[in-house]
Image (cartoon, helix red, strand yellow):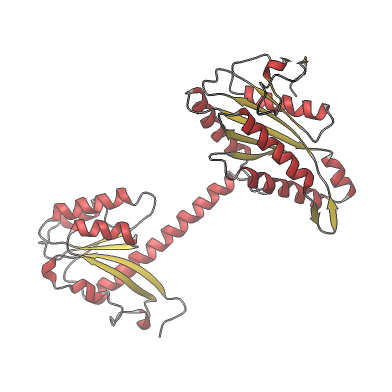
Amino acid sequence: MSTDTETSMRVLIVESSNTNKHLSSVFSPHTKYSAENGFGITCVFKSASSFAEAINHFQDMHPDLIVIELGANLTEACEFAKLIRVEEDQRHTGIIFLQGNQAMSEQLPAICLEAGGDEFIESKASDREVYARVSSAYRYKIMTDKLRSANHRLKELSLTDELTGLHNMRSFNKKYRQILKSAQELQKGFGIIMLDLDHFKSINDTTNHLMGSFVIGEVGRLIKEEVASIQDSVPARYGGDEYVICLPSDDPQEVMAVGQSICNRIRLHGFNHDGFLVSVTASIGLSWVPMGFKGLADDPLKGADLMLYKSKDQGRNCVNGMMLRDSIDLNHVSGLHLIDGNPSGNHNNVVAINNLKVF
């Protein structure tokens, strides 16, 4: 009868054809060394009589452990182990060498371990010892998997804003530099969208700070949903009730449409939490640069910030945008730089604005 702690171990067995499938019998589900006798591990295994066959099995089953029984060709066995270490990338696969028909020498264990093996077992070991050593290697493999998973989670947390689930600015800045470089190298243009929630302080004043936190998180969710289908988009929380999004795009109207859609979604959404129901609007500014952009690295961010404050000056709950093809004086922006939101227009149908300071 199996125990509650029983786990399934995927084992790939590579044994020479003249061993009469000895290892397969050791790891059979019906072996006397099964979970019923206290090991807590059952085996799902495949056997291979050649290393070419073993590679195919490895790619199909992604085993937890590979047990290699050495035959006449030690070099081929070691090359196979080295290949596995390359193929597995960041995933650790336990590799156990069994002496098999290979003549024992002082150098043999070291040769196998240097090729990528985790364990070397001499042929004089009993079946029980073989199974116990393999089970030990499996437990080590489980621990490394858990550690890798924990490290991955810690990395995610270090790059994620806890309240919204969006990128934090550390993550945003790293990805922004990559997208900017792509534009500068004539691969693809991009847009920057900045938004700020209108009169957010009044939410905290008239409800409570928990409601304010809920609104910030919920807006993050709406933004994430809006850009989810846009490949390589980077939505982030800029800080407080401000957000920034980087969108790879060769079309300024696409960026404007995303900004308008986010503005509408926030305006139409009812923020209902903890007995309070509030309505929220956002002021949005955006900038767009084409591939081949020759301006300064901060210009797209400053341009979007400038347009954000233009939206606030126009009464809030609206979107303004500008195009940046080269480095410009952001204190003197003309209609030639503005996006009017009309897909059939020439983006120039906006009255020129002058002497607006970058905040």
Q: Please report the residue visible at 21 percent of the width from the left and 59 percent of the height from the top.
A: 53
Q: Residue at the location (74% across, 39% down)?
A: 263
Q: Position of residue 184 (x, y in %)?
A: 51, 23
Q: Quadrant of the C terminus?
A: top right
Q: Is residue 239 visible?
A: no
Instruction: Say which of 327 and 23 sits in front.
Output: 327
Using the rendered view, name the quadrant where residue 121 is placed.
bottom left
Q: Find residue 314 and report its image quarter.
A: top right
Question: Is 241 left or right of 250, judged from the image as shown?
Answer: right
Q: Residue at x 90, y 48 (%)?
A: 206
Rendering coords of residue 77 (x, y %): 18, 55
Q: Look at the image and tell me whether residue 123 can be seen.
A: yes
View extreme (front): residue = 344
Vertical position of residue 112 compared to residue 256: above or below: below
In the shown orientation, is residue 91 left or right of residue 239? left
x and y percent of residue 167 in the render? 61, 42
**Left or right, 89 with reference to 49:** right
Instruction: Report the residue that reaches farthest toward the right.
Output: 206
Residue in front for this viewpoint, 280 or 39: 280
- Provide residue 64's location: percent of width, then percent of height: 35, 62
**Number of numbered callouts drawn:** 0
Q: Which image quadrant is residue 252 in?
A: top right
Which residue sits furthest bottom? 1
In the picture, the quarter occupied by the N terminus is bottom left
Closer to the camera, 63 or 134? Answer: 63
